[in-house]
Amino acid sequence: MKILGMGEFMEKKKYQEIVSQHKPTETRAQNAFIAFVTGGIVGVIGQLLTEFYVSFFDIATKDATTFMLVTLIFLASLFTALGFFDKWVTFCKCGLIIPITGFAHSMTSAGIEYRKEGPIFGLGSNIFKLAGSVILYGVVSAWFFGLLRLIIMGG
Amino acid sequence: MIYINSFLFAGAICLLGQLILDNTKLTAGHITSIFVVVGAFLDTFSIYDQIINYVGAGALVPITSFGHSLIHGALDKASDMGIMGLLMGMFDLTASGITAAIVFTFFFSLFFRPKN
C-alpha cells in the first residue's frame, strides 16, 4: 500500500470535498428529472396501447388495460433477457422501476441469474426474490384495508 | 388531454420514487412495496378509481395500481360472498399480470444466459 504524503493526502481530501459538494445535488436533480420524463413516457405508451387495443380488437377499456399490462410485462421481460434492459434501468432508475416494467424486470433478472443453480433451488426458489415483497405487502395490506372497509362501510 | 394527464401522473409517481430513493436509505424494493401499500390504501375509499378516470393508463402503469387491483378484486368478490370473498377475489384482477410475468420469466430463463 502506498503511503500518501501529507500534502497529497490533503489535496485528495479537498478534492473529495469539492466532489461531494457539487456532485450529489446535481445528479439528484438530474435523476429526478429523468425519472419523471421516462416514467411519464411509459404512462403515455400505456395509454396509446390501451386505445390501440380498444379499436383494434373492439374490446372494453378494462380488458384492453389487461392486454396493455401484459404487453409491457412481455417487453420488459424480453428486453431483460436480451440484456439491454439493465442499462435502461440504470439510466432511468425509478422511471422504469416504479411502473409494472420494474416488476417484470426484477423477476426475469432473478430468474436468469439463478437459473444456473438448478430448476428448483435456483430458478424456482429465487424467481420471487425481489418481486415477492411487492406481492406480500400488497396482499396483506389489500386484505387489511378490505377488511376495514367491510367493517366500516359494509362493502 | 388524457395523454398529458397520463404523462404527468405516471411521471410524478416515478419522480416521487426517485426522490425517496436518492434522499433516504430506502432501496428500490422498499419503495415499490410502500407504493403498493399506498395504492391499496387509496382504493379503500375509491380514491384511486377517481384518479384512473382522470388520467387513464398513467395511473394503471405504476406499481400503485397493483395494490389497487388487489383490493378492488377482493372487494368485488366480498360484495357477493362476504368476508371470505376477500380471500377468494384477491388475485382476480392481478392474475393476468402475475401469470404473464411468471410464464415469460420461466421461458426466457431457459433460453437466455446472463450477460455478465
Image (cartoon, grey):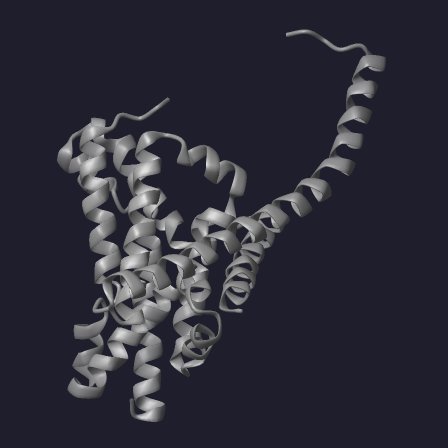
Q: Position of residue B112 (x, y in %)?
A: 24, 28
Q: Quadrant of the C terminus of chain A?
A: bottom left
| Residue that appears at 43% across and 50% down | B29
Q: Quadrant of the N terminus of chain A?
A: top right
| Residue that appears at 51% across and 44% down | A93
Q: Vertically, is B23 above or below B40? A: above
- For this rendering, which residue is in front, B61 or A29? B61
How many marks can you see? 0
Going by the picture, which residue comes out furthest to the top? A2
| Residue that appears at 27% across and 33% down | A112
| Residue that appears at 46% across and 63% down | B58
* Image side of residue A106 versus residue A37, left or right: left
Q: Position of residue B4 (x, y in %)?
A: 55, 64
Residue A108, quarter of picture: top left
- For this rendering, which residue is in front, A69 or B95? A69
Q: Vertically, is A153 above or below B56? A: below
Q: Position of residue A96 (x, y in %)?
A: 46, 47
Residue A67, quarter of picture: bottom left
* Image side of residue A6 versus residue A47, left or right: right
Is residue A63 something one can see in this rendering?
yes
Q: Position of residue A82 (x, y in %)?
A: 32, 31
Is residue B63 something one can see in this rendering?
no
* Image side of residue A110 versus residue A21, left or right: left
- For this rendering, which residue is in front, B82 or A37? A37
